[in-house]
Amino acid sequence: MRILLISDIHANVTAFEAVLAHSEGQWDFVWCLGDVVGYGPDPNQCVELLQTLPQLCLAGNHDWAALNRLDVKTFNPDARRAAEWTQATLTPENTRFLEHLPVTFVIGDYTLVHASPREPIWEYILEPAIATLNFPHFETPYCFVGHTHQPVIYTLPDESGNAESNLPKYNEAYALNGRRQIINPGSIGQPRDQNPKAAYGILDMTSGIFEHRRIPYDIRSVQRRMLEHNLPERLITRLEHGL
């Protein structure tokens, strides 16, 4: 079984379509780690495209914001404005899809969450110290997370040690070697590692091989749609810089 690992689409259907085209014929099922909506101009299109795929999708914090399960007043002003626009734009059918998304899922050797196993909706795993604190909160060898929009692999050398972080080597096979790991495939629709290309991963569950990938997409077309919908300028600009 080959899995397409995606996260943080953020209502960017152009990037989503680019990933699907780039990976066509290379996977059997999709694991989506949340934040299908938020920030971008295409919330309905992204939810609807996702539903056409054989998939398991988790809830992210922006999905919950679209459902009013999070107080958008806690967001920064640009994120709050985009969240309120998303709430007003989503169709009832697509809102119902988001309402039924789980926050965690365990399948075989893999735990799936949006943010962290300790706090599945909100905590950011941005450094080895935070990763170390999260390993006791899942029992499987591997955990896939999103939320930070930064591809990375955290490895726990042994149960008494601290996690080590490694940046991905794109388009290279990475063997899951039995050591406990937290793996982030990165963001499709809004990367934040100073690389604007859409990020995703491919997991071969049979061989235990994972591969990080990056591909370009038509950022300008997304920015034009964001401008048409009067979304915040900072959100529009950051796409081209991967910030």
Image (cartoon, rainbow, N blue to C red):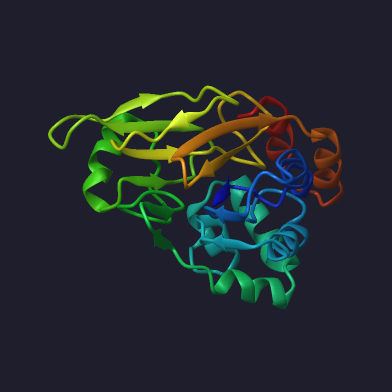
User: Going by the image, does 34 lie left or right of 220?
Assistant: left
At 55% from the left edge and 62% from the top edge, which residue is drawn?
Answer: 56
At 57% from the left edge and 39% from the top edge, which residue is drawn?
Answer: 201
User: Going by the image, does 121 lie left or right of 221?
Assistant: left
Q: Nearer the viewer, residue 137 or 43?
A: 137
Q: Please tell me whether residue 210 is drawn above or below residue 76 in the rendered image.
A: above
Residue farthest toward the left in the current orientation of the protein: 160
Visible in this render: residue 222? yes
Residue 101 point in image, percent of width and height: 52, 68
Residue 80 point in image, percent of width and height: 60, 53
At 12% from the left edge and 34% from the top edge, which residue is drawn?
Answer: 160
User: Going by the image, does 219 lie left or right of 105?
Assistant: right
Q: For the C terminus, give its image quadrant.
A: top right
Residue 61 point in image, percent of width and height: 50, 56
Residue 136 point in image, percent of width and height: 21, 48
Instruction: Locate residue 241: give its quadrant.
Output: top right
Q: Please tell me whether residue 97 is drawn above or below residue 170 in the rendered image.
A: below
Instruction: Locate residue 170: give its quadrant.
Output: top right
Visible in this render: residue 35? no
Q: Could you tell me how many numbered marks the image carries?
A: 0
User: Going by the image, does 59 lie left or right of 42?
Assistant: left
At 60% from the left edge and 56% from the top edge, which residue is drawn?
Answer: 29
Residue farthest toward the front in the current orientation of the protein: 206
Q: Nearer the viewer, residue 206 or 45?
A: 206
